[in-house]
Amino acid sequence: MTVEFVPAAHVRAVTSAIAAARQRALDDCGVPPRVPEAAYWEETFEANAAAVLAAIPDVELPFDRCVRYRFFGQRGRDLLVRPFVARTTTDVNRIRQVLDWHPPPDALASGGAGGPTQDVELLYRHFSFPDTAVGAFDYWLAMQELWASVRWVHSYVVASAEEWSRIVTREGWEVLHTVQAFEPAVVRADGSFRLAVLVESPLQRFQIALNQIEIGPEHALCYGEPVLVASGPRGYVV
């Protein structure tokens, strides 16, 4: 199987476009109420999803579909949500009531308690993306944005030796494993994609981990155990 790499220039361009889309969506939603209710958060996440997908044009939904949300509450600083796809004309209040919360797919990488879900039917199968390494990478980014965990919102994709050096040469960092390739790597096989992506997270402790993700034939995400490659100083409290 051939390993393909996503150019660092593309990584920076698409992640910058996503960050700008996030900010526009937040600005458009205005100042949140003093005690936001579920309706506010659902509208905010839906606006963010629409803005992010507009910033990644190769990841597509049918013209009559959009991403909707159910908000379940807050745990620490993490907002517990579940994205799903519906027709733009559908009243989704009844759908929201029958959905249960479960952690986003990247939270189950360590073999956590994750049972069967309806995410393929409710979310993944509705999307299309180019059958290329870049297409798979962009789709993974889009899904990470839709699940919108607090960890992901604060994360940074490391895609070049320069970025790696800029981070790990700071005081308090220790490199645990030598990294030979920094650009996201993608392997295509039998309708599936396997990705390996370096991601810096600043929560609790600054760390860079090699994330291993499989995108199945039905576009579902399955995470392998991340490999910690560098550890830094104490991070943000969550």
Image (cartoon, rainbow, N blue to C red):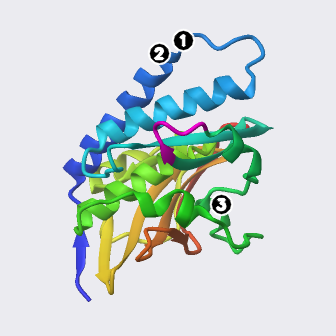
**On screen, 236 above or below 151?**
above
- Image quarter of the C terminus: top right
Residue nearest the viewer, comparing 126 with 74: 126
Q: Which residue is mark 2?
A: 27
3D distance between C-alphas at marks 3 and 2: 28 Å
Q: Position of residue 95 (x, y in %)?
A: 67, 47
Labels 1, 3: front one:
1
- The residue positioned 47% from the left and 53% from the top of the image is 143
Q: Secondary structure at mark 1?
A: loop
Residue 30: image tag: 1
Q: Position of residue 190 (x, y in %)?
A: 33, 87
Residue 107: image tag: 3
Disc 1 + disc 2, Cβ < 8 Å: yes
Q: Residues within 10 Å of mark 2 (few under 14, many from 20)?
A: few
Is residue 204 something one can see in this rendering?
A: no
**On screen, 106 above or below 186?**
above
Q: Is residue 87 magenta?
A: yes
Please report the bounds of the magenta region as a residue range: 86-91
3D distance between C-alphas at marks 1 and 3: 30 Å
Q: Main secondary structure of the magenta part?
A: loop
Is residue 39 something one can see in this rendering?
A: yes
Number of marks: 3
Q: Is residue 12 magenta?
A: no
**Three-letter code, disc 2:** Asp
Q: Secondary structure at mark 2?
A: helix
